[in-house]
Each structure stands twice: as C-alpha cells, then as structure tokens.
Amino acid sequence: MAKLIRQHQTKLPIIIDTEDGPEEITIDLAELSDDELAQYIFDVPQAVEEIVYRELNAQLGIQDNDNK
Amino acid sequence: MKETGFFDTVDDNIIYRPGKYTIKGDRAQDLYDRYRFYADPRNGFLQTDPDLHYAGQRAVESFKKSAETPSATKEEKAPSKRAKDLEKEVSERVNSASLDSFPDGWQTLSEEELEEKIRDDYKALIQTGPTSSSPSAQARFDRLVAETEDGFAARRLSEIADYKLDSNELARLQGREFPFPEAEIVIDESSPTPSDSTPTVKTKLNKEFDLSVLEERRKARQAAAEAAAQFPTNTASWESLDDFIEKALDSLGGSSSSRLAQVDVIAAVKKVQDSRQKYLSEPSDANKNEHSENVKNLLRTHQSSIISGRYIAIPYKSDGVLTPREIAELNAPFQKEANSEENLRRAKAPTVTESYNKAVADLRRDTPALSQNQLSNIPGKWSNVSVEDRVSQLEQTARDAFRNAFSNADVNDRQRDVIIKNLVASNIRTFMTSRSNYAEIKNDDTGDIVRLYKAPRSTSGGLIGDQNDLRLISESLDEIRKATNLTTPIKVSLVAPGSKINEMLGQTAGARSLGFAFPGAGTHILPQRLLDMIRRGNSSSGEYNPDTSWHSVPQPDYETAFKHTAIHEIGHVLMYQFWGRDNVISDGKTALANDYRTFGVSGQKISRYGAKNVAEHFAEAYARYVMTGDATPEFRNLLASKGLLKSQQGEN
C-alpha cells in the first residue's frame, strides 16, 4: 500500500508585537488539536491540508512518514 | 355493472379519479381476477402485484433481447440454459403466486417461443386496441398500460416504441399514462388523435391536454436505450455505478467513524474500477472472477462501513463484465440488509448532504452580522460577508487539498464532493464548538476584509471592536491605498486577549500581544490591549511612551496607536506576501534581508522597535511611509522593486 506523505508545510510562522518588543514563534499545525486547527481553516490552506491528511492517514493506518 | 370491491363502476370508458381507477364491471372483474390490479389511494395510479409484475418484466426483457439480436428460428435452435431458467422462473412465480399471468400453456414454452407469443400478442393488441374482444389480449394491454404508471414508464414506453406504434397508437397508450391524476379524465377513443399533430386527450370538460411532454420523454428513453445498446463502448450503464458510489458515500452518514469509512469504500471502488478495466482490456475467466470478487468486496465494505448512516443496495444492472443476473446474485445478500429493520431505523439518520446543509445553516445562525446602520457609519462601502461565501472558499480549499493528498484514488468529482462536504461539515462543527466565530465585513471597492471576533465570554454575542475601531481600520486601509500601490485585498481581525486564536500564541506572547500576523490571515489587532496601554501611560505620566524613538511614529493617543499597530502588522503581511514563497508558508525574512542589502536599506535607523530585526524594520518603515509619507530613497527603491510605490499605481 502506498504511503501517505505530508505534502504540505506544517510550520506556521507568527510575528507577535507587544509593548516590550517583537516575538516570533512557529506553530506546528501537525501538533495542534482538531479544535485548534479549526481556528485556521478559513485562512490557512495548509490547515485544511493537515485536516485532509489526518482523515486519510487515520483511515489508512499508514505509518507517519512525513517531511516535517 | 358489477361491483368489484376495488373499483367503482362506470360507463364504457376508463376513468381516472383521485385515488381511484375505475373500470366497467366484467372487464374490471377480469382484470382483478387475473392480475390483482388494485388502486393506490396515494396517487390514484393503478398498481399490479409485484410478483406478477416481475414475471412480466422478465418476459419483455427476453423479447427485447431477441429483437436486438436476430436469432435463428426455433426449429434450428435448441432451448438454451437461460431459456430453461426463464421458463422455470416464470413457472415458479406463476405457481407460487397462484396467478395466471400468462395464457394457459405459455408457462411451458421455451424462451424463444415465449418471445414470439408475446410479440404476436402485442401486435394483436396494437391492431385491435383496448376494445379487443380477446380477454387475454385485452388484459395484457391494460396491464402494459398500468405498468407505465407504477415506476416502469421508461422501460415500457421504450418497448412500446420497439413495436413500431404509429402516433395514434402511441397516443392511445400515452393517454392512459395521464399526468393529471387530480382531474377526472375520459379517454376519448372514438376520436383518435391525428397522426400529424401533438397527441392530445379530451376530458369530460372538453379540455385538451398536451401530451408533448410524454412524447419527449418517450424519445429520451428511446435515445437512452439506443445508447445503452452500444455498451460496453458507451459508459451509460457503468455511470450508474458511479451513481451508486456517490449515494453509498453519502449514505455513510456524518459521524466521524463514517467519515473515515468513506476512504475504505473509495479504496474498494478503485479496485472495482481497475478490475473492470483489466477485464475489458483482457477478457478472461480469471479477470472476470477477480472483478466479481471486487464488486462483492465493495458491497461488503460499504455494508460494514455503515454506522450511523443507511445502507443502500447497488442499483446498476450491468458493468460490461458481469451480467445482470450475476450482479443481482452478488447484490442479493446485501439487499436483505437494505430491507432490515436495523437499516430502516438507521434510515432516519441524516445523510452526508443533510448533515452538511444543517452545519451550514447552524453556522449561519451562529454567525453575527453588522446592521445596515453600523455598516453605513464606516467610511467606504462595506457589506457583510455571507456564510455561504466563507463555506464556499473552505470547500474549494478542501477540494484542492484532497486532490493533492489522494490523487491516486481515481475518485471522480461527484464522489469527491460528497467526501468534501462531509469534511467541511465536520470542521464547521469543530469550529463552532471552539466558540471562535466572528462577523466579517467586506469593502466592496477594494475587497478588504475586517473580521470582528465574538467576545470570548460574552453571552449576548458581543463583538470585539466598536464603531470607532471600525472607523480607524477603514481610515488605515484608505491611507495604505493612497500611499501604496497595493491591489490585493487585506484582512484585518479584531480579537480579544481571551480569544482562542490569541491564546494559542502561548502564555508568554499571548499575554502581552498588541497585534500579530501570520501568512494567510492578515493582521490581528487587540483593541483592548491598545486602550489599556494608552490609559496606563496617561495615568502615570500624562503621555503614553514619551520615548518617541521607540516607534517610527509617536503614539500619543489611542487613534495613532491603533492605526500604527494596524499598518505595522499589515507591513508584516506584505513581507509574507511579497518576499515569501508562493504556496509555501514562509515568513520571507531571508529574501527581505537580501533585498535590504541590495537596495542599501540595511543599517538605516527607523526606530528602536525597528532595530530588533529586518521584519520589524520593514513594518516600522512602512508604517511611517504610509502615515507620514516619509521614507528614504533606499526604502522607496525597495518598495519600487515590488511595484508597491504610489507612483506605480496602474502598473500592476
């Protein structure tokens, strides 16, 4: 059976500006819960790709072989 | 006149009435005795006993087959196994139902003989019409007419056409399949319809009904029958399997488990499609057996995948590999499931489509909107973004994502749509559960979007941002449009410290954020934090942040702080957009830094905040450029390299 590979990038860089100065973080979409992932579904195509990936991967039972 | 118990008594003509089918005495009794006709009170159509119906159907199919393939005479040809099977089947059905579906002696005829009898009988029917004195011919004529009305119209009218009826004869038959059951109709057989005009039937009220619709349907059926006759080069029959697959996926229901099960069904479908193609390329018993196993596996997989949905039986008759009988045999065990009590109970469960429609409707109800008064008070032309637009965009993204991730599945668009709907519905539910919904308004001229998140703990549906904030956003966007050659829409979101999307930044950053930005979603502003910051400054020193070197534009008040923050964050978005890589999440910082060196921007002082890194420097310099028009020649050259200068308007 063909292996399902994450074709999408999962790292989401975020720039945060505060009173004290800027901060930069990276959120890994692959590590978000479904609930958290839903926050990005209307904006970040990779979030939707992650959802599709999870659907297919969970059903096919394929060992994770992603490129994250 | 004789009362039958089922039929009213009438005069010499056949009369349709709501919920009734009336036939004169002896003739009605004959029909009832021989064929168990009964009236269906729901639609006023005549019904026949299902068993008898089936036997008749088989006989007509046999006849049709012989008409398509000229066969040898009965003297030259021994009865085939299929003929014997048919004979046995007809005999068994007739005997078991105790119905005299065929004249005496017909049950023992071979298939060819039976076909010939039927052909002659129909010819006699056509020649004599419904006033024939032959009881059996008359009965079968009426039965043929009746069957056009209980779900077999397509087959029957097509078959009638095969007997080369002229338009008068056809009109006479079609008149029985009258599409106006609510009207009291008398078939006026004394005045046959002229053959050179559209068939009509007169009523007691002398009203003429146009039967051209029936004529068109007949032609369409004939065309479909001709197309099907070209199988397997024509795919008409095979497409019915696609219909089944689509319905099968839809029937799995909207639960998470069922959603996942769709992939199982898709995989089984793929095998069926592959094995069919294999057989068509290389017909052999082995390939046929493999295909048969794959069809069986598809049926089994679908059945076992049913959790909250409903099972449907496979409806197609032929796939170019298996005969209708072979398909029927494969389907039979699963047909029992379709009729089971459990399945009937599950039939109340929503299909994927129903779940999807409900999810969209729920999202529509959950989504706040600005009043016309609020919209009209914002500078510019603004309108609410519809939920349908949001969902449509999400669907398109999901469709693309599914195609990319599962391209090998060979799933057609219709099947994919069912899966996408399921996926979208599921995620709409998750999204709503997270209580992160928002109102969205759109500038009709620029396409800019402003999103107002729901207040996290509000029970009254309050939104983050007030009318003043909306004014400030609109003015900021307007200043950007006037100062910069930017043609793409911008998205600005107003969020609260307790909004989930802010809390996801983490305790450290999320607790102190004034604004943030990431690729795809534009900029986010926290008005409450900005207001608190300004108030703190005022309470302690009477002026917020007297260190004017902190930002590129001094922020003495809320309005300036708000606008600067908005334009600063949009500066980050421009970096993602113009220096990031297409279709890949990238902050673009490396490319921007390279261009800074190329155009000599690096090293220029803009503010202490901008000195933190190249991204902040760009955002600070961009905010100053938009708000004051002040920019170094090097920074202008940098903007010009991306076509962003005001003087470049119209070039993009």
Image (cartoon, rainbow, N blue to C red):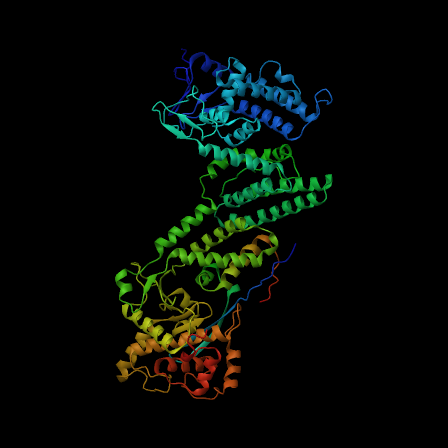
Query: Where residue B607 sits: x, y (%)?
Result: 40, 86
Quarter of the view holding residue B235: top right
Tell which of B121 and B48 is nearer to you. B121
Numbered marks: total: 0
Q: Is residue B600 visible?
A: yes
Query: Where residue B98 sits: x, y (%)?
Result: 55, 16
B75 to B616, vertically: above or below = above
Q: Please state if B34 lies on the left or on the right of B14 as rendered.
A: right
B47 to B520, vertically: above or below = above
Which residue of the protein is positioned furthest toward the front in this rendering? B196
Query: Where residue B105 sits: x, y (%)?
Result: 62, 14
Quarter of the view holding residue B210: top left
Tell which of B624 and B638 is nearer to you. B638
Query: Where residue B252 sits: x, y (%)?
Result: 51, 45
Q: Please state if B7 lies on the left or on the right of B153 as rendered.
A: left
Q: Is residue B182 visible?
A: no
Tell which of B506 and B426 is nearer to you. B426
Q: Please state if B559 lies on the left or on the right of B141 as rendered.
A: left
In which quadrant is the N terminus of chain B drawn? top left
Please report the residue visible at 43 percent of the width from the left and 12 percent of the height from the top. B25
